Image: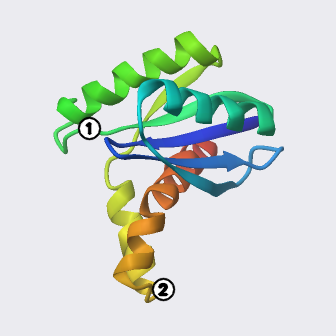
Amino acid sequence: MRILGLDVGDKTIGVAISDPLGFTAQGITTIQRKNEEYDIKELSKICQEYNVESIICGLPKNMNGTIGTQGEKVVEFCEIIKQNIQIPIKMWDERLTTAAAHRAMLEADLSRAKRKKIVDKLAAVYILQGYLDSL
């Protein structure tokens, strides 16, 4: 049972995958977004390669729990994923995951350039691991 974790942004999509038993999440890539067709094609390839059974997508909420502009964009993109890839997709509250990813990288003393390259992938790991832990 492989689960895909996504951190969807305007410019990139951080991608993580669970181990086959669904205990741990590992970051696998960051997709540089180009257009809807390209984004779906890249996600579809990953889903086939890892035999993904479900997708968890981080839903950015405001601190008061409401869904803002970015959250609406993510919900729209998830609908496109559902229509094109046809794998069950769930939304997961991603509040503070990017902040946690930045904190972890600062503690690891990574340079700003290295942090910028992997922050979305690490945020996807936090999203997916939070979901896996809730099971």
Cα–Cα span, label 1 and label 2: 27 Å
Q: Is residue 88 left or right of residue 111?
A: right
Q: Quadrant of residue 28?
A: bottom right
**Between discs 1 and 2, the one toward the N terminus:** 1
The numbered disc on residue 108 is 2
Camera-near label (1 vs 2) is 2
- Counting from the top left corner in percent of width and height, residue 65 is at 22, 35
Q: Are marks 1 and 2 in contact (CB under 8 Å)?
A: no
Residue at point 57%, 42% (across, down): 5
In percent of width and height, residue 88 lies at 62, 18
**Is residue 68 at least partly visible in the picture?**
no
**SS for callout 2:** loop
Q: Amino acid at mark 2?
A: Ala
Residue 66, quarter of the rendered image = top left
- In the image, 131 versus 38, the foreground residue is 38
Q: Spot the residue most to the top.
A: 83
**Vertical order, 114 against 108 (above or below):** above
Residue under pointer 1: 61
Q: Is residue 61 shown left or right of residue 101? A: left
Q: In which quadrant of the rendered view does residue 105 lie?
A: bottom left
